[in-house]
Amino acid sequence: MRSSQMIEPAQRQAVVPRARTAGAPVGKASVPTLTRVPEPVVERVPPLRRLAGLCAWAAILGFLGLVVGVRGMIAILVRAPDWYQPTLIALGLVGIGLIVLAFLTVNLRYIPWLSLTLSTGVLVTSIVVTGDATA
């Protein structure tokens, strides 16, 4: 070997920085924070009776909303006033949003039922509005 390629004994010891630890003692118990395995996420499953009740109520609202929507479309094509179309669209979107909110909050106790009750009120309002616009 040439003298320029020879490694001095002091150069053989490489300085390796230590990994950051989460305050654990140095030794075998110190695990870098980047390699820790996260704790498993526990998902709460709603009771099946509640889910079945929400689905049944939402299905009834969906069917009646479809009937009102078809009747509204016929009214718009035939002789509905100018205010009717945006009103029916707004009521439909609010009702659908409330049903979606009921399913998003299914793990809570009262909010899904309140949301479906409000959606039923919106559906009744759209039925009344459709009756007034076509009379």
Image: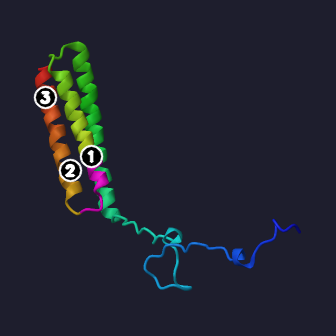
Q: CA distance from mark 2 to mark 1?
A: 7 Å
Q: Amino acid at mark 3?
A: Val
Task: Read off the residue under disc 3.
Answer: 129
From the top left corner, tell me how far across and down residue 126 is, in percent.
Answer: 17, 33
From the top left corner, tell me how far across and down residue 13 is, in percent.
Answer: 68, 77
Q: What stretch of residues is rendered in magenta?
A: 99-108
Does dot 3 land on a helix, a strand or a loop? helix
Q: Amino acid at mark 1?
A: Ile
Rendered residue at 16%/33% (across/down): 127
Q: CA distance from mark 2 to mark 3?
A: 21 Å
- The answer to whether mark 2 and mark 3 are in CB contact below 8 A is no
Residue 22, compared with residue 119, is above or below; it is below
Q: Residue furthest front?
A: 3
Rendered residue at 22%/38% (across/down): 94
Quarter of the image for the N terminus: give it: bottom right
Residue 63, compared with residue 70, is above or below; it is below
From the top left corner, tell me how far across and down residue 22 is, in percent.
Answer: 44, 76
